[in-house]
Amino acid sequence: MLENAFNVVMAHPLLLAVIKILIVFAVLSGIVAYLVYMERKVLAFMQARLGPMRVGPWGLLQPIADGLKLLLKEDIIPAGADKFVFLLAPAISVLAAFTVFAVIPFAGNFYISDINIGLLFILGVSSLGIYGIILGGWSSNSHYPLLGALRSSAQLVSYEVAAGMALVGVLLISNSLSMVEIVNRQQQMGVWNVFLQPLAFVIYVIAAVAETNRNPFDLPEAESELTAGFHTEYSGFRFALYFMAEYTNMVLVSCIAVTLFLGGWLRPFSSVHALDFLRWAPPVSLVGAAVFILWLGLQSRVPLERYFFVALALGCVAVGVIISYPLILNAVQGIFWFGVKVLAFLYAFIWYRATFPRYRYDQLMNVGWRWMIPLALANLIVTAVVRYLLSAHTPASPVAWLLR
Amino acid sequence: MAETTYLDANELVINMGPQHPATHGVLRVKLNLDGERVMGSECVIGYLHRGVEKIAENRTYAQFAPYTDRMDYVAAVTNGMGYVEAVEKLLGVEIPSRAQYTRMILAELQRIASHLLWLGTHALDLGAMTPVFYTFREREEILKILEKYCGARLTTHAFRIGGLQYDLYDGFEREVVAFCDYFMPKIDEYEQLLTTNRIWVNRTRKIGVLSGEDAIAMGVTGPVLRGSGVKWDIRKAQPYEAYDQVEFDIPIGEHGDTYDRYLVRVQEMRQAVRIIRQCVERLAPGPIFGKVGKVIKPPVGEVYHSIEAPKGELGYFVVSDGSTNPYRVRVRPPSLINLQAFDMMARGHLVADIVAIIGTLDIVLGEVDR
């Protein structure tokens, strides 16, 4: 019967796509919720404190409690607000953020779709998220949200230019806009794009931090100056939607950076066969996680917590054993390496927040327009010229194309 | 009434505080803005006025001492120290050397605690959220020492007129030296986070510049004055207790901007550790109380005594009419006088810089309003 169901799904690509979408959506929502938990924990450990500890063992149920709390809160709509737009705005933000994941290849064998203008699609749809912010700020009909929204959109628009320019450099060396093709190309070349386009990578990372409104570019939320920025008037689950959009965007820019610059689902040095033992990394890291969880659990004095941690550790070991079967081991390679790289990126995001003070608004604009965009342009021109010189002997050179 | 024409109104007045996270208490600032640029400002104070000076007239000399702790509540030790010394001067008593060195140790520890609080909150105002947790961790160690000595962490009432109420507890010297050893590398840690951080430098350099002449003209004192390059420290200029017998430097700034004031305060913490180490070495067994009667009745007269509190010159003007209550106590709080320079420093800056300027002045509203 299982085989039968499998055949039915395979015969209907639409059904397959829907299933994939559901999986991605569910997993992503979970990741976003626990990203907040991870941020609070990592920040806490960097700042000599513990972070959430009360809800569940080591505060593991905190995101669920937060979500429930926000769901149950009163949904306040200010009297002077433009009701329709006010209700619509957070949905736009969160929708734009989630939609982009349609073209992200999580592994060589797992992506929702691979369209030939993938990168353009990403740039286009993620820009729509700005509408959510500016409409939310404007429809609140209140001063601080309006100012916050203006600042946000100015910031996002300026840094989007720099980010886009940086991505064009990658495009030039990849010869394709398809995300899957860009990763495959990195495999063929045997080198990740970050080594060919280091400047573009740095510019993209900085712009990505600015685009997600994260510290040191978190001006829209500069509490000490502007209260909460564009979402001041939002409460309850509408506020949660904005919150979700922000963290989804964090995951998103990490995914884009990993795909375009860090070889996507490829394992480090994938062309060096001497390092093939690295394919055992997924089960080994799961066992490592199990040991760590066991160590945590043994420190707890609450019996229930100890059982929970032991069960969790056993679960990790069990999953580790299951994925050690060669067939499954090969299948999880891509998603594992992709996940590790994205996690590293997210960790860096949190690390910045613990380290940097905040830029002033005019300084932020200075950095964007006077440094990032010229540098990205220079990088683009140099890449293009080198690319042209390297391929000048081929008939398909740009000049020939122009003269045609 | 004149007709308002909005076309001419290029100045926008906005109100910051008294309930605002960056005004460090209940300071209210009215800002005249041209766009985001500050054209002028007015500080509205008095939200925390408790009539401390008037209370003094209805209390005996000894009874008033705990009230002084509630003025600069993050530096209670130095506040009490200024008052008891003023009354001692009025009485004309000498206090024994053990009491003097104890007072200096506790006062310098308090200076470090006050500067730590300032550093953490100032960085937090400018968006760096980590330093505040580090500085509070170290401040906690100081508060533990204070608590072990006199039972209170914040409003300590550590000293009595004529000396000390309690002698030091066993192991005090060891704990203080251990703290000094532990603390010195921590200062480097804070500096690593901030001093060469590009964003930090961008946010503080050339912000709230106060030239040396202006600083003197406005009467500012303490780190704000020294940040403007004026080498003035009451511990050197008019030594009290035994400050003339210990070695320390007065760190000064060059440009008088927020960054220089930051550097000055960080250096002052190092100098405070230096003073504490010397005092601990000279701490010898002996009496801790001078010749003061049960009832304090100073002769008719008046006295002005000032000390170098963490925030600047803290002065007490005490008038005695020969009775058991002071006739008048007037406090010269450093925070209030330093706040006078705010408008001068804020003009021409952006709204976001106002937060930095309030932070760099290191005001405590309990002391501004009294």
Image (spheres, rainbow, N blue to C red):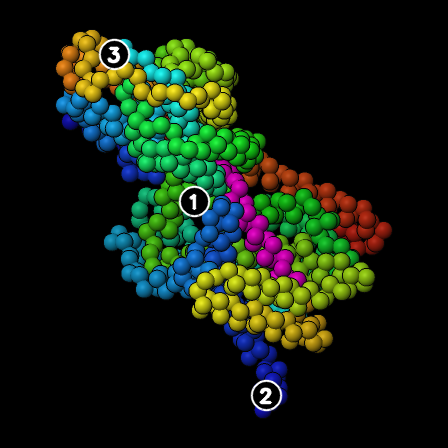
In magenta, the rendered stretch is A336-364
Q: Nearer the viewer, mark 1 or mark 3?
A: 3
Magenta: main secondary structure: helix
Q: For residue B304, what is the image quadrant?
A: top left
Q: Nearer the viewer, residue B50 or A206?
A: B50
Q: Secondary structure at mark 2?
A: helix
Are the residues under badges 1 and 3 in a single subunit? no
Is residue B4 highlighted in magenta?
Answer: no
Quadrant where the N terminus of chain B is found in the figure: top left
Name the chain under label 2: A
Picture coordinates of residue A53 (x, y %)? 43, 57
Q: Residue at point 28% right, 23% down?
A: B160
Q: Is residue A211 above or below residue B336?
A: below
Q: Residue at point 61% right, 69% down?
A: A111
Q: Residue at point 73% right, 42% down?
A: A382
Neighbor class of circle 2 (other Cα within 10 Å; few <14, some 14-19, many 20+) is few
Q: Secondary structure at mark 3?
A: helix
Residue annotated with mark 3: B90
Name the chain under label 3: B
Q: Nearer the viewer, residue B46 or A394?
A: B46
The three-letter amino acid code for the residue at tag 3 is Leu
Q: Nearer the viewer, mark 2 or mark 3?
A: 3
State the residue lying farthest toward the top. B301
The mark found on residue A2 in the picture is 2
Residue annotated with mark 1: A220
Q: Are marks 2 and 1 in contact (CB under 8 Å)?
A: no
* Residue A210 seen in render: no
Q: Distance of mark 2 from mark 3, alpha carbons? A: 97 Å
Q: Nearer the viewer, residue B86 or A152?
A: B86
The three-letter amino acid code for the residue at tag 2 is Leu
Query: In the shown orientation, is residue A371 left or right of residue B23?
Result: right
